[in-house]
Amino acid sequence: MGKKSVSFWENGAGFGRSEGFGQGGGGRHNDGHGSGAGRRSSVEAGEAAPEKGGSASKGGEPGLVAVPSDTLSDEAIEELKFMIEEEKLAGDLYEVFYATYGLNIFANIGASEDRHFDAVSNYAEKVGVDVDAFVFETVGEFSNPELQEMYDTLLEQGMDSLTGALEVGVAIEQKDIVDIAAAAEEVQGTALADIYQNLLQGSYAHLDAFEGLLG
């Protein structure tokens, strides 16, 4: 997928941009970090409109399919695993930033990232990909060393100031847009491509929300 190295993120840089968003949602972690689960139970509307598109399933989660019949290449499966952890990275950082700064945008978008995580991990389970290593990881821990280094770098930047945390949000969503679009290219015509398109719409909206607060 041509992912950028973590050094690309050290000054809060990102990729391109665009539009869309999401709010509310259930929790992914049982233990949390800081206010953790409390963040997800106290999500308030008001930062943006809900995401649209994709199939719905239990709990109203977008982008899930009942019985996927896709045949994925080994490369597509590796991309899927990367996307699961990349969604976790976003949710974990927003959880910490909400606990630190108390700004609702982090709670709202963090809950949306949880739904993104659920959508891709549930799909992976349905096509026989073992996702336990991701689902049961604690906040801030990642199997992929690139994502671990990226998390550590972005966490340090975001804890420096509220503006820094919002800039991290922009950088994360810009990277998500590029990575999701590239992953969708590889699986065109599948149910997974539809899920990726729904995630892409959400990332555009998250980006708009963060950029709106930064002015």
Image (cartoon, rainbow, N blue to C red):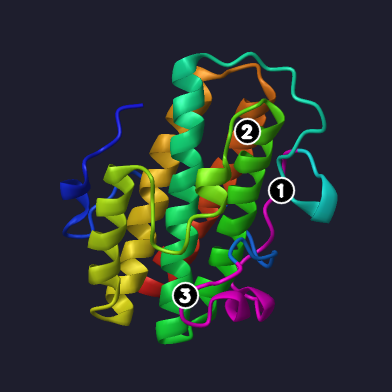
Q: Is residue 96 left or right of residue 148?
A: right
In the rendered image, the quadrant that contains the N terminus is top left
Residue at left 81%, top 56%? 59
Three-letter code, disc 1: Lys
Q: Quadrant of residue 145?
A: top left
Q: Which residues are magenta?
A: 30-54
Q: Position of residue 197 (x, y in %)?
A: 60, 35
Q: Main secondary structure of the magenta part?
A: loop
Q: Is residue 180 visible?
A: no
Q: In whole angstroms, how far apart are the C-alphas of marks 3 and 2?
A: 26 Å
- Secondary structure beneath label 1: loop
Which residue is label 3 attached to? 33
Q: Amino acid at mark 3?
A: His
For mark 3, does the 10 Å Cα neighbourhood hold few (<14), some (14 to 19), or many (20 or more) residues?
some
Q: Is residue 35 magenta?
A: yes
Given this view, does label 3 or label 1 mark the residue nearer the observer? 3
Instruction: Look at the picture and state if 153 lies above or below 120.
Output: below
Residue linked to disc 2: 124
Task: Give the image location of residue 150, x and y in percent.
Answer: 27, 53
- Quadrant in the picture for residue 11: bottom left
What SS does tag 2 mark?
A: helix
Task: Locate the C terminus and report the quarter of the image it occupies.
Answer: bottom left
Mark toward the viewer: 2 or 1: 2
Please give left or right for residue 18 compared with residue 167 in the image.
right
CA neighbours of label 2 inside 10 A, class few (<14), some (14 to 19), many (20+): some
The residue lying at 37 percent from left, 59 percent from top is 170
Of callouts 3 and 1, the N-terminal one: 3
Q: Residue at x 49, y 50 (%)?
A: 87
Q: Which residue is mark 1?
A: 52
Percent across and percent down for residue 120 are 61, 40
User: Between disc 3 and disc 2, whose residue precedes?
Assistant: 3
